[in-house]
Amino acid sequence: MMDELGAALETIGGLQVFPYWADRVTPPAAVVGWPDSYSFDGTYVRGADRITVPVTVLVGRLTAATSRDRLAAYADGSGPSSVKQAVDGHASSAYDTATVAEVTEFAVYTVAGVEYLGATFSVDIMGSGS
């Protein structure tokens, strides 16, 4: 499932994608985190499970105005750099649906001692129970 989210994000041109938390990144980069929550039995008899996964997009250093503008394009609801459009429109055999529900945080993230401007997106995933 994390690899499939990574595949969806790879459709965004120029974005380096990690379907796991990386020790080092070269921005712009997207990192798929471990699930925040995992709910079983959304429907009867193992019909559906629900997972919420954070995806963090990191752009250049905090002080660059271009970083702000680049991050805004990733946060757009649609367009060639839109995280929402890339994830929501991706067909997967690993889950039934994936929807970017919200941007939960715009913040400064530190990776390998370097600060990056970034945003964390909350991805709501539904799939058949196993």
Image (tube, rainbow, N blue to C red):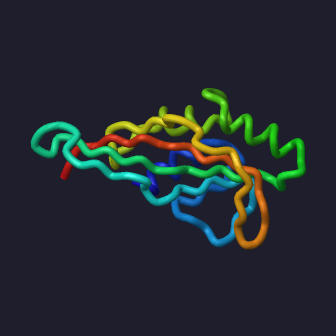
Residue shown at 49% from the left, 35% from the top = 101
| Left or right: 25 in relation to 126 | right
| Vertical relation: 49 (above or below) 112 | above
Q: Where does residue 110 sit, x and y in percent of width and height?
A: 72, 64
Residue nearer the viewer, 92 or 73: 73
| Left or right: 67 in relation to 91 | right
| Vertical relation: 50 (above or below) 35 | above
| Left or right: 57 in relation to 85 | right
Residue shown at 89% from the left, 48% from the top = 64
Q: Residue furthest left?
A: 45
Quarter of the image where one finds residue 106: top right
| Vertical relation: 103 (above or below) 36 | above
Number of callouts: 0
Q: Residue furthest right?
A: 64
Q: Residue furthest top?
A: 78
Q: Where does residue 91 sit, x and y in percent of width and height?
A: 41, 38
Q: Where does residue 25 sit, x and y in percent of width and height?
A: 70, 64
Residue shown at 89% from the left, 51% from the top = 63
Q: Where does residue 121 sit, x and y in percent of width and height?
A: 56, 43
Residue shown at 51% from the left, 39% from the top = 87
